[in-house]
Image: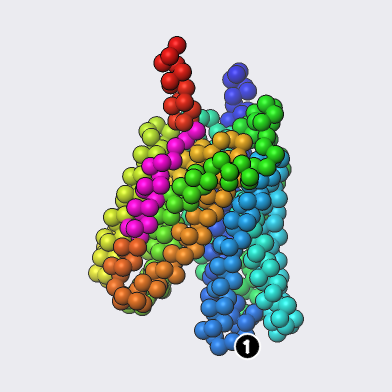
Amino acid sequence: MSAATHRSSAAHARKVLISSLIGSTVEWYEFFIYGTAASLVFNELFFPDFDPLVGTLIALSTFAIAFVARPIGGVVFGHFGDRLGRKSMLVLTLTMMGTATFAIGLLPPYSAIGVAAPLLLVLARLIQGFSLGGEYSGAVLMSVEHADRRRRGFFGAVVNTGAGWGLLLANLVFLIVTQLPDEQFVAWGWRVPFLLSAVLVAIGLFIRVRLAESPDFEAVKKTGAVRKVPVAEVLRRHPKLVALMCLAYLSAGATFYVGTVFSLTYGESQIGASDSLMLGLVLGVNVLTIIAIPFFGWLSDRVSRKHIFLAGVLGMIVTPYLWFGLLETGNVALMMLGFLVMFVPYAANYGVMATFFAQVFPVGVSYTGMSIGYTLGTVLGSGLAPIIATYLLDATGSWLAIAAYMSLVGVLSFVAALFLRERQEVDQQATAPAAAST
């Protein structure tokens, strides 16, 4: 490869990375603005006939619907991503995701169109969840498969910082619009975060439609090895890998959602901390993860990615006890230290997860396999974590049960990850006997 060709390839890889990061950021931005709006105004706008508490619970249940739709989207987009290519599916997922999010910002309230309002809200949320099921895995694969093999860990990690950027943007926008008088916020202010998503989506699509297809997929296509029914092959030949990936994700999902979602309620009800203090702690540690995740991705290009993944899980098994203990002190500095202690191993684990997971399945079914395994993990590890934590606190009255739950989940993830191997490792072990016999 000439120097000019190498520079051109590297420049294109960076464009792919930027596009994937934008897609990941939009995914998480949408996630956080919907959750915030559901808590603040959706009960009043779309479920006004219910008691305020019941209306809020129903509004939050529409938030959870997306988790149910994600695995379905993962199956569909993964199947066609392995059949037709990553690029076309990513253009479609970002278009669907952006359209549904923008549409929520335009929805008339219950007072204007009656029961059609909550029905349309649920429909838009289902479309969001469905498209998100194919967005993450496809974005990771495009970035990792375009990257130089010596930088794949770093590229995958940058995509995973989308969670941090999405959280920062969502909180920044809501911080601005909540300064409006209550009447204006309820009338139109809450719509602004949803409508602004169109800017990110437009930039992402502008870049995505100009990208080349994944070189790994093109290689499969040239050899005629494109699978006719990737979903069937994954379920028939690789169900163990799907289950292991799902379980390997659980610890990161539980740690993130207990630490960033459940902690807000826990801090106010159990410690007496203000909402602004808890939110400040969450945003502070979020800045840490944006910095630390790429570092661990970079490190994984130099040392064993799997070892970093496992070390992160071990940290998440132990640190919940320290985190809760430091939160209970009520001292702001010690509370922040608690967040740092728990989220450093999280950053190590999540920082290498994207590239590690992207290279578990054979290339011909990697989109399908990763989409199914990862999205099932988000349902069990992310979607259920705050609910389980709330139940355990109510049932036992102690944070020890929650910490034990997080440790148990961590043990499951650690054991599962022990049996996961990247394709390169599998290929080397498969060729070793043949080389030894020659």
Q: Residue at x 72, y 83 (%)?
A: 114
- Quarter of the picture containing the N terminus is top right
Residue extending furthest toward the right: 113
Whether residue 180 is visible, yes or no, is: no
Residue 323 position within the rendered picture, expressed as x and y whole percent measured from the top left: 30, 62
- Quarter of the picture containing the C terminus is top left
Residue 407 part of the magenta segment: yes
To which quarter of the image does residue 400 belong? Answer: bottom left
Residue 266 is left or right of residue 19, and the answer is left
Residue 277 part of the magenta segment: no
Q: Secondary structure at mark 1?
A: loop
Which residues, given as a range, are shown in magenta? Answer: 406-423
Residue 148 position within the rendered picture, expressed as x and y whole percent measured from the top left: 53, 30
Q: Residue at x 44, y 70 (%)?
A: 387
Whether residue 59 is visible, yes or no, is: yes
Q: Residue at x 48, y 49 (%)?
A: 243
To which quarter of the image does residue 385 belong? Answer: bottom left
Query: Local crowd at mark 1 within 10 Å, few (<14), some, or many (≥20)?
Result: few
Q: Amino acid at mark 1?
A: Asp
Front residue of this view, candidates 269 and 375? 375
Q: Residue at x 64, y 34 (%)?
A: 217
Q: Which residue is mark 1?
A: 49
Residue 14 vertical position relative to residue 44 in the rendered view, above or below: above
To which quarter of the image does residue 54 belong? Answer: bottom right
Residue 114 is left or right of residue 387, and the answer is right
